[in-house]
């Protein structure tokens, strides 16, 4: 565990920040990811009724 902390400190120094700030940034990223996942789930539920009515052929996909 100490080795991990030391390596994290080195990363912080290389990024010209602190270990605490790296941790805060990571927390914000984790929370943001969960919020994006929830938003996508809501979108999927709202659009679950939409259907293309089957698969398209290659020719149909390339029609302009």
Image (cartoon, rainbow, N blue to C red):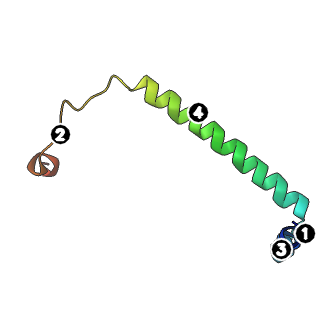
Residue 54 on image: x %, y %? 18, 34
- How far apart in space, not on screen, are marks 4 and 3 (Cα)? 33 Å
Give the mark, 2 or 1, whose residue is nearer the N terminus: 1
Q: Quadrant of the N terminus?
A: bottom right
- How far apart in space, not on screen, are marks 3 and 1 (Cα)? 9 Å
Q: Which residue is mark 2?
A: 55
- How far apart in space, not on screen, are marks 4 and 2 (Cα)? 28 Å
Query: Residue 2, labelled with which disc?
Result: 1
Give the mark, 1 or 4, whose residue is nearer the N terminus: 1
Q: Residues within 10 Å of mark 3 (few under 14, many from 20)?
A: few
Q: Which residue is mark 4?
A: 38
Q: Residues within 10 Å of mark 2 (few under 14, many from 20)?
A: few
Give the mark, 4 or 2, whose residue is nearer the N terminus: 4
Q: Residues within 10 Å of mark 4 (few under 14, many from 20)?
A: few
Give yes or no for contact between labels 4 and 2 (Cβ–Cβ under 8 Å).
no
Give the mark, 3 or 2, whose residue is nearer the N terminus: 3
Residue 27 on image: x %, y %? 78, 49
């Amino acid at each position: 565990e100490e080795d991990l902390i030391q390596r994290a400190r080195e990363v912080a120094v290389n990024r010209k920040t602190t270990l605490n700030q790296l941790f805060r940034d990571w927390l914000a990223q984790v929370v943001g990811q969960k919020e994006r996942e929830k938003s996508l789930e809501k979108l999927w539920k709202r659009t679950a009724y939409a259907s293309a009515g089957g698969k398209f052929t290659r020719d149909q996909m390339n029609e302009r």
